[in-house]
Image (spheres, rainbow, N blue to C red):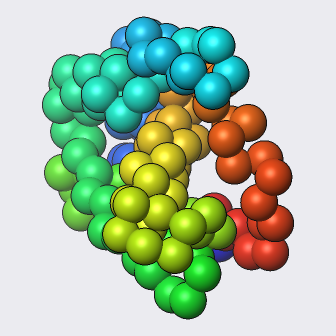
Amino acid sequence: MMMTSENICDIATALSGCQGEMGGAEKGADNPFFNSKYADITSVLKAIKEPLANHGLSFVQMPVHHENEAGVTTRLMHTSGQWIESTLWLPVGKADAQGVGAAITYARRYALQSILGVPAADDDGNAVAHLSLQRVWW
């Protein structure tokens, strides 16, 4: 579920300009399980950092965890005080710190790409394809 500040006209204008400047996230990380490449979190951050700053935009991502799910709440903010926020929940494949951390990192990439419209085709999506997606919120 997406939430916003009362008004989003300034952030919408800024996001439009930002998207006009943003390139795709480079698929430079290797996924040995599927013999493919994907855009990792570093590549996504590199693609968005300067365009965000150029248009008065920033973001924060707060990890969330509950039972067998983990993810992030991503808030996109504008210098006007306007904001857009969404939470992405993913199932945790392994109930330990590494499993929760992997789900959070995965969610960070996809949440940022989604809220900002960053193009990149991630080939590592197959890694969680076998998990039951009981609840995925944007």
* Quadrant where the N terminus is found in the figure: bottom right
- Left or right: where does residue 124 sit relative to residue 135? left
- Left or right: where does residue 68 sit relative to residue 108? right
Front residue (pair 26, 116): 26
User: How many discs appear?
Assistant: 0
Relative image position of residue 78 (x, y in whole percent): 26, 51
Front residue (pair 129, 137): 129
* Rendered view: 68 above or below 107: below
* Rendered view: 28 above or below 91: above
Q: Residue at coordinates 55% horizontally, 13% vertically from top-left? A: 37
Relative image position of residue 102 (x, y in whole percent): 44, 54
Q: Residue at coordinates 45% horizontally, 80% vertically from top-left? A: 65
Q: Quadrant of residue 126?
A: top right
Relative image position of residue 82 (x, y in whole percent): 33, 61
* Rendered view: 124 above or below 101: above
Please indicate, yes or no, whether residue 134 appears anywhere in the rendered image. Answer: yes
Front residue (pair 43, 14): 43
